[in-house]
Each structure stands twice: as C-alpha cells, then as structure tokens.
Image (cartoon, grey):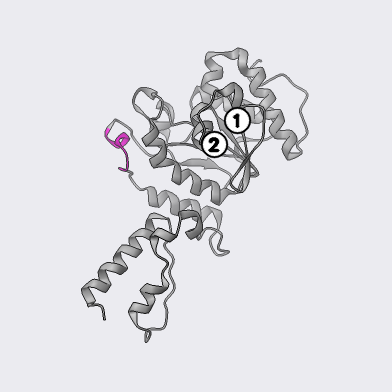
Amino acid sequence: MLQDSELQQQLAERLRFYRELGIYDFYRRDVNAPIEAAIEEMPPPSLQTSSQASTFDEPQMTPERALRAIREDIGDCTRCVLHKQGRRQIVFGVGNPRADIMFVGEAPGADEDIQGEPFVGRAGQLLNNMISAMGIRREDVYIANIIKCRPPGNRTPEREECETCSPFLMRQIEVVKPKIIVALGAVAAKTLLGVNDAMINLRGQIYDFKNTKLAVTYHPAYLLRDPRQKKEAWKDLQMVMKHLGMPLPKQKEPGTE
C-alpha cells in the first residue's frame, strides 16, 4: 500500500506530464475506487507520445479553443535561450483555425516581435501578395513559424531552438488539420521534413507529412533579396493550387507589379 505522500507525488508527476502535452481536461472516477488503481490506469509517460495523448480531436474542443490552450501552455516561454536575448513577446500564429493551407516560416523578425503576429513586415507584405495571387485572402490561411521568438539580429534559428519550439507547431498543425503545408524557406523545410538538403532539391514535389501534405518554396525574405526567384516560387504555389483543385489565375507571379 502506497503512503499518501508517495501517491501525491506520483499524481503530481503524471499531471505535470499531461499538462506539458497540452492536456488539461480530466474526468473523475468512482471515489470509492482505490487511488492506486487510478494511477495504474494512467498510461506511463514512457509509453505515450504527445500525438497519441492529444485531446484536440475530442468533439467538445473546437480548433479555436485548442489553439488557445496551446498558446496558454507556451506562456511567457523560457524553454530556450531566446527569452534572454531580447525577444519582446511570443509570436504564436494567426489565421483561419480550419484553413486548408498552412504557411510555416522560420522565425519572427523585428516587426513581428513588436506586433506579435507572424509575417507583418516587408516579407509579410510579399507573402500577402503571394496568397492574393492564389485567389484567396490572408484570413483564409493559417500562418506560423518554426520558432516563436525572434532570434537576435534575425539570425538563423539554431537547431536546439527549433527542436525545443517545433513541438508546439506540430500541435498547431494537428489542430488546424490543413490539407497542405507550405514550408517557406530552408529552415522550415529541413525542420519539418527532418532532412538536410538544398532548396533546389526540396522544391518541386508534394511530400507526405504526418496526416497531410507538404510543399516547399522560397521564404519571402529571400525573394526580396533575389526577385529573380519569384517565378520559381510562383510555380511552387501553382503546384499547391493544382493539388487542392484550385483554379489557376492568369496573372504574373506575385510581386512583379
């Protein structure tokens, strides 16, 4: 028979584990049942992953509520060094919680760090043009980043930072359930696909990604530095549109006006 202190410690550890996975709703069992049985019925952490334990598919939890739960779970994050390196706030994600298309970038920049919304600077304006060229609105898609804090000087996110933060993105993807993800740039593509390859090799195909699809194109910030690649990015977006059965607008690639 376990002592009360031991039982409380075990329950506290289990509850902490589930909260880290984003699970907050629990149901009471028969108060007359032994508490040891309650602990035994809870699957051990070593046998359960965040995707297996997710409660976001439960009918009573809407995508809006699930995304709020993830944001609350992130809190004023101190999980990596970026919270000590000048970031102002968490930049979570924005858009339609039930979007067919989800754009995933690299990290917030200076404007995003100020406004708390991804892709609101010059690169964001170009992304808006790219989305508009597809015949849809920014409000129709969901936009997020691999990491949610601005790296100092807009440097490339480090591997440890991506590994620490990307599980929250995976939970966002699980909630939104897009029909396709568009990875913007090398960091997003390599992190999501788990590969280390050149953009020229990653582009031009539709990948199977968990329960959805994924395409790779250039980051809008890169297109601002090298406008010659806008034609190639437009080809990537047209490939996405064809995959979704969307009509292809007869216009120039976005950003050439």
Q: Are marks 2 and 1 in contact (CB under 8 Å)?
A: yes
* Quadrant in the picture for the N terminus: bottom left
Q: Which mark is residue 230?
A: none
* Quadrant of residue 6 within the rendered picture: bottom left
Residue 122 or 234: which is nearer the viewer?
234
Secondary structure state at the residue bearing disc 2: helix
Indicate whether residue 79 is drawn in magenta: yes
Is residue 179 positioned above or below 252 on the image?
A: below
Q: Nearer the viewer, mark 2 or mark 1?
A: 2
Residue 121 or 6: which is nearer the viewer?
6
| Residue 144 spot, x, y in % from top left | 50, 38
Secondary structure state at the residue bearing disc 1: strand
Residue 81 or 113: which is nearer the viewer?
81
Indicate whether residue 168 is drawn in magenta: no
The residue that mark 1 highlights is 216
- Total labels: the figure holds 2
Q: Amino acid at mark 1?
A: Val
Instruction: Give the residue furthest to the bottom.
Output: 32
| Residue 121 spot, x, y in % from top left | 48, 25
Residue at coordinates 33% horizontally, 44% vertically from top-left? Answer: 77
Q: Earlier in the sequence, mark 2 or mark 1?
A: 2
* Quadrant of residue 80 within the rendered picture: top left
Residue at coordinates 64% horizontally, 35% vertically from top-left? Answer: 137
Q: Amino acid at mark 2?
A: Leu
| Residue 193 spot, x, y in % from top left | 54, 36
Label 1: how many Cα within 10 Å (few below 14, some 14–19, many 20+):
many
Is residue 102 positioned above or below 23 on the image?
A: above
The residue that mark 2 highlights is 193
Q: Which residues make up the magenta segment?
A: 78-84
* Quadrant in the picture for the C terminus: top right
